[in-house]
Image (cartoon, grey):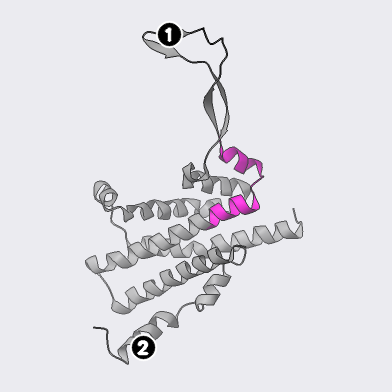
Amino acid sequence: MPLQEPLRTEIDLYCKRDLAGDLQWHIDQFSFIENEELRKRLGRAFYSARYVAKLMEALLASGDEVHPFIKFQIMQYASIYEAVVVNVLWKNYANHPEVIQLQTHKAYKPVAAFGSLASMKYGDEDIHTCVYRNAKTPRSSIPFRDKLDCAVRIGFVEEAYVEDIKKTYELRNLAHIETEAEKQIEVEIAQAKTGYWRIKPFLEKINSVLAEAEAGLP
């Protein structure tokens, strides 16, 4: 049974009181994202992370009760970083040499170098002729750490805070309880705060770089 009024309204007002803006304000922080649906979902993820942080504060959650609040915030911020970096890399820099290199790997491709009657063996195993050439790596197979490093080299993510973003993303993977138990890692409030503190310079840098690119500035 839900809490009665006016307590519900009081809690809601507390959670919204110190936010930088409403839901639309948070959506507008991603104005450089052309995909409207993605932009809305990023804004909603940002807004909900902030709302939950304030709810945790309002309830003065502690001990085991604080865990779900922290974990949710980390998951939201990590997902924001990932979605933004991937979108900018392949939307704005798809033909950049760094992105092309990022999604290129060497692979062996079988070729019929000899006649169909020719065969070679190594012990009991057949030997097949191959060429070693460039192949395209599926975007989803590229580790996020590598995508972030690529973003740093291109220049739309600052190296000064990239390790903090990597750590936030690493902590997100603790959503798998088996992994969390195996590594014996507990998320902490400071880690959720770091995820939040890096969002502002992260978005400001991207906005600045893309605006300069659009204006034709070097």
Q: Is residue 89 magenta?
A: yes
* Residue at 32%, 61% in the rendered image: 188
Q: Secondary structure at mark 1?
A: strand
Most extreme residue toward the front, as rendered? 117
- Please give left or right for residue 31 compared with residue 9 in the image: right
Which residue, given by chain and number where applicable, does mark 2 sit on?
A: 9
Q: Which residues are magenta?
A: 84-104
Among the two numbered marks 1 and 2 on one chain, the one whose residue lies closer to the N terminus: 2
For residue 121, the mark is: 1
- Please give left or right for residue 125 compared with residue 29 in the image: left
Q: Is residue 182 magenta?
A: no
Q: Secondary structure at mark 2?
A: helix
| Count of all numbered marks drawn on residues in the image | 2
Could you say where residue 194 lies in the image, as x and y percent from the top left? 43, 61
Examine the rendered structure and indicate whether residue 188 appears above or below residue 118: below
- Magenta stretch, overall SS: helix
Most extreme residue toward the bottom, as rendered? 6
**Residue 132 in sight:** yes
